[in-house]
Amino acid sequence: MKAGFTGTREGLTAKQKVLYLGTLKQKLKCTELHHGMCYGADEQAHRMAILNGVPRIVMHPSTISKAYKPYSIHSPTEVIELPPKPPLERNHDIVDATDILIACPKTKEEVLRSGTWATIRYARKQGKEVIIL
């Protein structure tokens, strides 16, 4: 299954890390992970996917350079970096390319000025399953 990932630049909480790993391995049997190539949660999700044998990761970087996090992780996982796009367009690409969205927002309540919550809203509009951790 192809999974998209969205999360906060502040990184995952300890509980989100445990839930993410369980979702990635047991529930989804993820074969491909797409994320926004940002620091924080994206980088953590990327590393955990590699450590847990996800065979392919597709990175969708943003044109906002302060959020961009180049990764230098050597592994047997195939890692593809796509050309940068504006954040909302990039987030739509992640949703459109995947079967399901794993979301790790900073807040339990929906926030209007949040890229993570905007991605969740878009995925729901597209009829995609969304798992919020």
Image: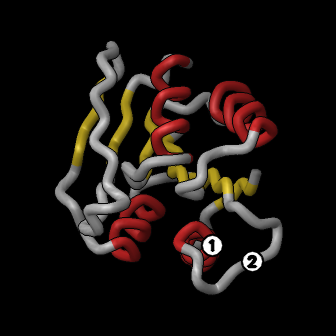
Left or right: residue 126 compared with residue 59: right
Image spot of residue 80 (x, y percent): 25, 38
Circle 2 residue: 110
Mark 2 Cα-neighbour bin, 10 Å: few <14, some 14–19, many ≥20: some
Q: Residues within 10 Å of mark 1 (few under 14, many from 20)?
A: many
Above or below residue 35? Residue 53 is above
Relative to 120, residue 83 above or below: above
Q: Is residue 46 left or right of residue 106?
A: left
Per the model, the C-alpha gap separating discs 2 and 1 is 6 Å
Sequence order check: which comes first, mark 2 or mark 1?
Answer: 2
**Does residue 125 sit above or below 73 in this rendering?**
below
Q: Amino acid at mark 2?
A: Glu
Q: Are marks 2 and 1 in contact (CB under 8 Å)?
A: yes
Determine whether the residue tagged by mark 1 lies in a helix, strand or loop. Answer: helix
Q: Residue 23 at x, y = what percent?
A: 71, 36
Give percent across and percent down for residue 21. Answer: 68, 30
Residue 47 located left or right of residue 65: right
The three-letter amino acid code for the residue at tag 1 is: Trp
* Residue beneath the point at 76% across and 66% down: 107
Residue 117 - label: 1
Residue furthest to the top: 76
Q: Give the answer, above or below, for where 105 lies relative to 119.
A: above
Q: How many numbered discs, if any?
A: 2
